[in-house]
Amino acid sequence: MIIDTLIKGIQEKDNPTVVGLDTSFDYLPEEMRAGVADSKGAAEAIFAFNKKLIDAVADVVPAVKVQIAYYEMYGVEGLRAFAQTLQYAKAQGLIVITDAKRNDIGATAECYAKAFLGETPVGGSSLRAFDSDFLTVNGYLGSDSIKPFLSKAPNGEKGIFVLVKTSNRSSGELQDMKLENGKTVYEYMGALVEEWGSTLVGECGYSCVGAVVGATHPAQAEILRREMPHTFFLIPGYGAQGGTANDLKVCFKADGTGGIVNSSRGILCAYRQDRYKGMPFDAAARQACLDMKSDLNAVIKG
């Protein structure tokens, strides 16, 4: 199952870090932006940046998370760079998570599922549009919004991460509301995620149906870790959003398993930080990944 492959990668590289390729043109070094005046040039520069960064980190991290919004804003050319980035990362042996937070029902959800996790029939053949190992999805439309995605991975060869407790400050406006049974909305969603993944548990003890649980809400994350023993966490919020290794320790079990931690700007823009001053962007990104690895492991395994 794909969740076993992800966890094996984390263990082999001793690194629970996923690099978020939320690559804005503005993040690129000045020399890569010089002379670019249209979306085609911007998209090509972004892909060139991503390639060098992937080459620099592929042997020290198990996965990348590619946020589609950062590519959609450059139009068709941006989506081409998005597809190229997915393909290149997979070719370098990395697990690829597409962060698209898809959310719909029926035929529309089926189309999303085909685009990112399955195949689209064309004539007598089929194509894989944006082939990903995992996709982030929004389950707040209920099981109708999840089943189409699960249908593309009946044996666990693909996976999803469902929004449960998100890292943004205002998430509590809805997710922390109490239900009549005393549970919060995020706890109820967590229970649904455990149920949705109950038939897709791998040898590692975790399901191919994971959960997005933000590092910025450690009290809620601790509850979810206890109530979701078979669910693997994708953990945003570390670094630029204010979450620390100490905050997210509660997302992991005593054996150090249970999650993978995302960092985007902290790695993409590491070369702009004082501690990495003077380093090429790819070398700075690599060192930032190694520093993050040390920071996380000191707490998770401490």
Image (tube, rainbow, N blue to C red):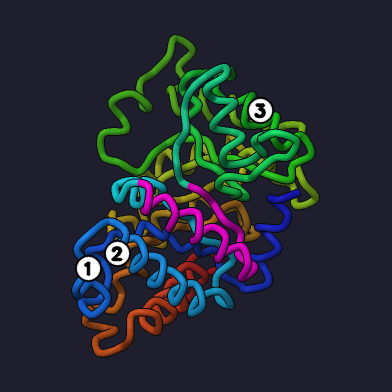
Pair 3/1: label in front: 1
Question: First in sequence: mark 3 or mark 2?
Answer: 2
Residue at 73% x, 54% y is 4
Secondary structure found at label 1: loop
Q: Position of residue 179 (x, y in %)?
A: 43, 14
Q: Is residue 246 magenta?
A: no
Apparent side of residue 44 relative to residue 190 in the rendered image (left or right):
left
Residue at 47% x, 27% y is 103
Give the spatial CA distance, label 3 vs label 1: 46 Å
Q: Which residue is mark 2?
A: 41
Circles 3 and 1: CB distance less than 8 Å? no
Q: Is residue 79 magenta?
A: yes
Circles 3 and 2: CB distance less than 8 Å? no
- Residue 71 or residue 176, whichever sits in front: 71
> In this rendering, does residue 239 appear at all?
no
Secondary structure found at label 3: helix
**As displayed, is residue 270 above or below residue 66?**
below
Give the spatial CA distance, label 3 vs label 2: 43 Å
| Region of the chain picked out in magenta, as a range | 76-98
Q: Which mark is residue 36?
A: 1
Apparent side of residue 148 relative to residue 137 in the rendered image (left or right):
right
Q: Amino acid at mark 3?
A: Trp
